[in-house]
Image (cartoon, rainbow, N blue to C red):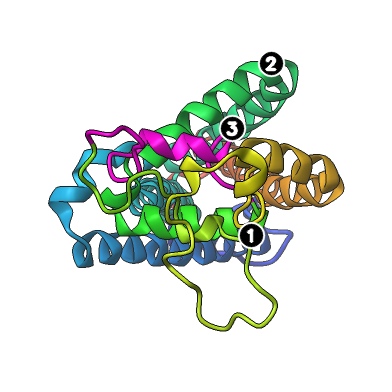
Amino acid sequence: MEGRRRGAPGSDEDFSFVSPVVKYLLFFFNFIFWVISLVMVAIGVYARVVKHAEAALACLSVDPAMMLMVVGILMFIITFCGCVGSLRENICLLQTFCISLTVIFIIQLAAGILGFIFSDKARHKVTEMINNAIVHYRDDADLENLINYGQTEFGCCGGATYTDWSQNIYFNCSQSNPSRERCSVPFSCCIPSRNQVVPNTMCGQGMQDMEHNEAGNHIHTNGCIDRMVDWIHSNLFILGGIALGLAIPQLVGMLLSQILINQINDQIKLQNYNLKHRSDPWS
């Protein structure tokens, strides 16, 4: 399809149904997200290289760096199809791009609906993920930082309660545990003092041995699951805006790609018509 002439509107030979505006708008739209996907993959690879790979392999399912790489690679492939397909006016690549966006959009929509309908099961699944992350807390530096950030921001500790940290081999509260952190919790569970500048990393020492009320004077005893649910209920409009912000680029990409596909098909039909009805094949 490349190299077609676009002449005067009155000339059937030079007329093209393909709009340069749609074509290059779709290209630049995909190019932006293609660059973003490269940055995501680069960050993920860097994070995997700088950390201890042998320890990180133990918890790939909860490794933020691996999740970033997977999402980045998937986005790279899809946007690459969009970029090349729009430039080369390749229907196969454009259809691949459009179908991929449609499938992802349907999956996201279905996940949101199912998560709302089966909220109890979704809560149970999230609890499993958090408990799995607690088990591998010391195995992955990225995961450790992510959990500490979440507990600090939400003011929580553990999944359902602060004693969930006994699932971790270092914080396990059994008498046979030789760890110096036995019966402790991470410092991110601690209630910071007003004048505290540098976090006290030993503030969670022995907190699991204390009664709930006594421990509550030093650390956040509420689990992160309840805090997350409360936060979601309090920020439904914000989350709805974010969901809409993620959906709009997908819808725009699907719309532009489908318009371009239809224009290319119309141009092919016009060329075939001109070939069949050319009055003088030697002109």
Q: Distance between the residues labelled 2 and 1?
A: 27 Å
Which residue is under mark 3? 160
Foreground residue among 219 and 73: 219
Q: Nearer the viewer, mark 1 or mark 3?
A: 3
The reply to whether residue 95 is visible in this rendering is no
Q: Which of marks 2 and 3 is in front?
A: 3
Q: Quadrant of residue 142?
A: bottom left
Which residue is under mark 1? 153
Q: Give the range drawn in magenta.
A: 156-176
* Residue at 56% in and 46% down: 157
Which residue is under mark 2? 118
Local packing at callout 3 (Cα closer than 10 Å; few below 14, some 14-19, many 20+) is some
Q: Which of marks 2 and 1 is nearer the N terminus?
A: 2
* Residue at 49% in and 64% down: 31
Residue 207 percent coordinates (x, y): 49, 48
Q: Which of marks 1 and 3 is nearer the N terminus?
A: 1
